[in-house]
């Protein structure tokens, strides 16, 4: 996803080589310096034991999970056999960039990545997502005139591109029902919805919302939507905005594709929220704050769509190292979470406790690369892939509970900013 990290790669002038002029390193550092402590957020209007856990304890003081049924866990996929596809996001503008969406394969047993080709010559496909039916891949075209592009995986046919209505889209996701495509425009601070037909082809936008309030956080010049995802209930979609230090919840009309705002969750000023990942139980989520180098456990109420952000916690980064946490992933059984640390160049390992209400830092593992921009688990959960932007490599790790073990030498891929294993 698009963030302060790009300054080290693309420092050319506006619209250099057709790309977007990236990145606000000065603004990001100013935001980090301006962080101030704030009280824990207020609980939802009707407090309950699922409320926000400052450091793991719900607002009413009840031990997390007390009197509650255990959350349902998603089943772990059976172990895959034979080579599996791996799709790679990159930047095509600028020196040493890629030529489009990369295509490789990996061995699900050893983690070895082989082959290098191009699925489709899409411009600046920095973030990728796959349709729930597995037939279509979507990429953002992270340029000033932003777009989303659909590619049929069976024959690499580009099915079409649609404008996102904003600049520098950095995130794309598909609603679980498969009918709606969600995208976040970092440059213009807006989120968009596109309908998808039965073949996965995107249509004209049905919604475009720009984050005009609250005002930008410390060191920011405007809103910067960084992620747009669907909550586990399927009725609400959440937009994470780094520029306004806010996570917005919208109700998605799944008939017409329109958005209605229902709540806002305020991160502490200067936090710079970047990426949110839900626990399989659906009641909690984990937020990576890019600018102040923290993470937070969030409580989520499916009935109202309200998210409540908890107290800041450590990313495990070393003292004196400038670090920008990028992305969380959570194991299918909900027992462990992993965080990509750009700058510290590690993956932080967490034990997930109290039915999802608490994160306990276990330690960090070096990525053996530079600037892990994005991480992803294989469908069976046995491998973790780290896309290392500055070193142009994809690191692969064997996952054993909360332990990570490097699976051989990292795979070379130009300006690797996203890896999607199928």
Image: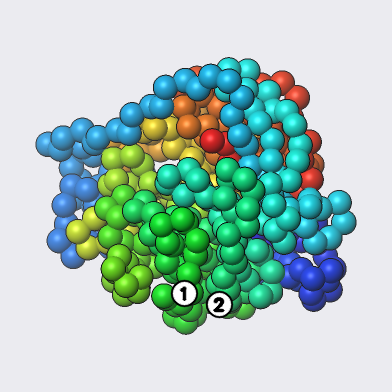
Above or below — where is 202 with respect to 347? below
Tell me where residue 360 appears, x and y as whole percent.
43, 34
Q: Residues within 10 Å of mark 1 (few under 14, many from 20)?
A: some
Horizontal relation, residue 320 to residue 57: left or right: right
From this view, report whether residue 255 is shown above or below residue 221: above
Q: Which residue is located at x 59 percent, y 29 percent?
A: 84
> Where's residue 377, x and y in %?
52, 34
Residue drawn where x is 36% and y is 42% of the image: 279
**Label 2 element class:** loop
Q: Would you say residue 358 is visible in this rendering?
A: yes
User: Label 2 vs label 1: CA separation?
Assistant: 8 Å
SS under mark 1: loop
Sequence-first disc among 2 and 1 = 2
User: Can the viewer see residue 170 in this picture?
Assistant: no
Nearest the viewer among 163 and 209 is 163
The percent position of residue 138, horizontal first and vertical second, equals 56, 55
**384 or 234: nearer the viewer:** 234
What residue is disc 1 on?
Answer: 205
Decide if residue 82 is on the left or right side of residue 79: right
């Amino acid at each position: 996803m698009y963030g302060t990290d790009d300054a080290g790669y693309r420092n050319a002038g506006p619209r250099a080589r057709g790309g977007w002029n990236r990145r606000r390193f000065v603004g990001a550092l100013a935001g980090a310096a301006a962080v101030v402590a704030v009280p824990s957020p207020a609980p939802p209007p009707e407090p309950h034991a699922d409320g926000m856990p400052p450091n793991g304890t719900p607002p009413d003081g009840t031990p997390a999970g007390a009197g509650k049924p255990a959350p349902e866990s998603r089943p772990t996929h059976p172990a895959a056999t034979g080579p599996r596809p791996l799709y790679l996001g990159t930047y095509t503008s600028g020196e040493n960039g890629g030529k489009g969406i990369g295509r490789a394969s990996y061995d699900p047993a050893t983690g070895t990545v082989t082959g290098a080709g191009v699925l489709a010559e899409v411009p600046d496909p920095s973030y990728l997502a796959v349709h729930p039916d597995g037939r279509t891949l979507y990429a953002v075209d992270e340029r000033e005139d932003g777009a989303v592009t659909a590619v049929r995986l069976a024959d690499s046919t580009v099915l079409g591109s649609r404008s996102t209505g904003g600049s520098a889209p950095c995130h794309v996701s598909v609603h679980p029902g498969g009918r709606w495509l969600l995208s976040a425009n970092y440059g213009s601070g807006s989120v968009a919805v596109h309908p998808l037909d039965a073949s996965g082809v995107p249509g004209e936008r049905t919604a475009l919302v720009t984050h005009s309030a609250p005002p930008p956080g410390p060191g920011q010049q405007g809103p910067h939507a960084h992620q747009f995802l669907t909550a586990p209930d399927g009725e609400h979609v959440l937009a994470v905005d780094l520029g306004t230090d806010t996570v917005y919840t919208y109700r998605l009309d799944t008939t017409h594709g329109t958005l209605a705002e229902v709540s806002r969750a305020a991160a502490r000023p200067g936090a710079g929220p970047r990426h949110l990942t839900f626990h399989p139980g659906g009641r909690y989520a984990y937020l990576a704050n890019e600018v102040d180098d923290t993470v937070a456990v969030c409580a989520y109420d499916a009935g109202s769509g309200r998210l409540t952000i908890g107290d800041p916690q450590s990313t495990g980064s070393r003292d004196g190292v400038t670090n920008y946490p990028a992305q969380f992933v959570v194991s299918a059984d909900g027992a462990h979470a992993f965080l990509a640390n750009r700058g510290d160049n590690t993956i932080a390992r967490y034990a997930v406790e109290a039915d999802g209400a608490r994160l306990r830092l276990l330690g960090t593992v070096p990525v053996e690369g530079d600037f892990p921009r994005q991480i992803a688990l294989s469908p069976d959960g046995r491998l973790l892939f780290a896309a290392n932007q500055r070193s142009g490599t994809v690191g692969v790790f064997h996952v054993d509970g909360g332990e990570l073990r490097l699976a051989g030498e990292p795979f070379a891929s130009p300006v690797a900013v996203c890896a999607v294993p199928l």
